[in-house]
Amino acid sequence: MAENFEKLFDQFSPVSPEEWRAKAEVDLKGADFDKKMVWRTNEGFNVQPLYRGVDIENFKTLDSLPGEYPFVRGTKVDNDWAVRQNIDCSDVQAANAKAHEVLNKGITDLGLQVNGDTDLAALLNGIDLSKVQIDLMCCPKCAAKVATKLVELVKAAGAEESFVGSVNFDPFKHFFKHGAPLAADIKALAIELIKIAEPVKNLRVLSVDSLLLNNAGAYIYQELGYALAWGNEWLAQLTEAGVSATEVARRIKFNMGISTVYFMEIAKFRAARMLWAQIVKQYNPECDCACKMVVNAETTAFTATAFDPYVNLLRSQTQSMSAALAGVDSIVVLPFDKAYKTPDDFSERIARNQQILLKEESHLDKVVDPAGGSYYIETLTMSMAQEAWKLFLDVEDNGGFEAQLNAGKITEAVNASAKARFDKVAKRREQLLGTNQFPNFTENSEHRADNVDYTPAPDGALNSLRLASEFEQVRLATERAAATPKVFMLTIGNLTMRLARAQFSSNFFACAGYQIIDNNGFETVQAGIDAALDKGAEIVVLCSSDDEYAQYAPEAVKYLDGRATLVVAGPENEEFKALGINYFINVRSNVLATLKEFNAKLLK
């Protein structure tokens, strides 16, 4: 068989990258190759349409195996990960019952929201601490108290060597949320926690919560670059205080987000392990094992939507798949309805099953580093590493993570990225399926978003709004109005163009929840306008070809005579503006701004 394949390949002569590009340029018929075929990422590097072995032949990381330094191929010799579900523990007895329930349904990692007064013994009653991973989330000032209780329970269970878990000590979160530093001696608290955790080998008590940045709209390289600087802050501060680098590194846990850019996220986690290993190595730890990065990955809330919420399942599925392929240690899949309510049993079950499908149906836990060797992924990994490393060095050159955070520079940079992404979503340069593109025309929120807080974060704090927030507010305003505006597609002339533009326009106005009235076509403009007015349309969209608009647009303005608002589906035209046509919609339109303007004009 192998011999036959070799003969098959012998029939084809090698093709150089230059030859391939020359042929592609011929097929492009004069179009610019770089503009048509090369993708410029938000991370600041270009992605080519084709990668070959020659593109990765000098990558030194290809010589390492899974489980070997610098761990780009993973920190383990398998690809298993912990399936985590977060549980609110305000009612300890109910939380314990729920924990037991979900442990029988595929969960292997419990994320428990607690405080200093929580009865941990009751909360963890009946749970085998040698087998179930426990991650406790609490406020920074009560972390020592919580950690002390946990260590006592682990010791009582004789699980000091087998227990795996964490106490989420995140003193920097206060600044991100409120724009002001935590009023506490962070270094002293961290040292105290390390001492408390000492008897339990795999208890991590120093958090790097770059998930906050991801959920605020950071670009992927920003999350990674700042996460590295955040982790290095722990290493620098605590080793200066006399704690060994090995002990500090073994107590750090990274909580990272997963965005919707599938292959880039795979590259991010691979690059993260490689770069973190090299950072820790500079502190001369006792062994390379201290250089391993432990990562919990959580699907992002930033792109979740309150409208067409089942699309959130598609987003979270691809996100969790990218994290699984990248070899993270545990994954949290947010329930699809979390954007607008407290998740119910159904949505939590679906979220659990999303990960179980990746294991039991797709067997992603059976193959370590399945992306390894891919020309594309390996190149993305190195490109991502380079951009994140530049950001890391910039932070370090300017005083380090805490100094940059307290100066507001990190929040400022992430918020600038979020603002750029909001702008792209408004113009459909970044798509949110079901929100700014291909919305469900007949959907009603059924009060889903009534309790969603759309209040922006205070000045100096990290962005708290989801990417869909502004579109959702436009659509909610439409729902709450006394009457829903009607948009009539006046389709006429060239069949291909009128159908294409009617579909584009229908999607455009449906993003605001307007009633869309589409049509097969009209013989005359007058017939179309009569039909529109008969339907009570407030907006009439003229859908035809650019050439035919020269005839149809003046006719429409004259016959409509201000009885409804005329919109032309096509490029802006100064001659038509002179006739009194003020609205043109096309691929360059700011969809959000246009819909806001119509809402202000039509809603009562």
Image (cartoon, rainbow, N blue to C red):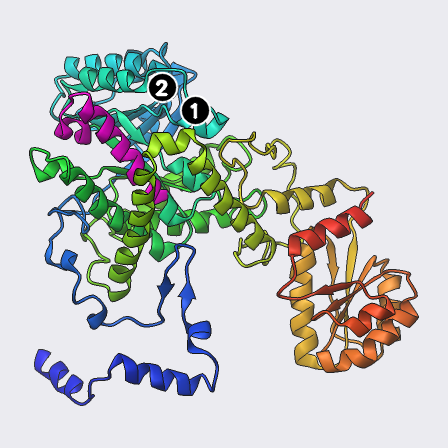
- Classify residue 570 as left or right of residue 368: right
Give amino acid for label 2.
Pro
Quarter location, residue 147: top left
Mark 2: give few (<14), some (14-19) or many (20+) Cα within 10 Å. Answer: many
Q: Is residue 541 magenta?
A: no
Q: Nearer the viewer, residue 474 or 108?
A: 474
The disc, 1 or 2, on the residue closer to the chain's N-terminal end is 2
User: Which residue lies under the disc numbered 1?
Assistant: 174
Instruction: Give, as a single range, the part of the protein colored magenta.
Output: 223-250
- Give the image location of residue 32, x and y in percent: 46, 78
Describe the element under mark 1 as helix, strand or loop: helix
Q: Position of residue 542 (x, y in %)?
A: 77, 70
**Which residue, as the protein is rendered here, is positioned at the far front?**
398
Pointer 1 and pointer 2: residues touching (CB < 8 Å)? Answer: yes
Locate the N terminus by quadrant.
Answer: bottom left
Locate residue 275, reporting x and y percent: 22, 46
Considering the whole magenta stretch, tell me its main secondary structure.
helix
Instruction: Say few, some or many: other residues with alpha carbon within 10 Å of mark 1 (under 14 / 14 to 19 / 20 or more).
Output: some
User: Which residue appears at 59% of the width and 32% of the height?
Assistant: 453
Q: Can you see residue 107?
A: no
Quadrant of res 202 = top left
Residue 283 shows in the view: yes
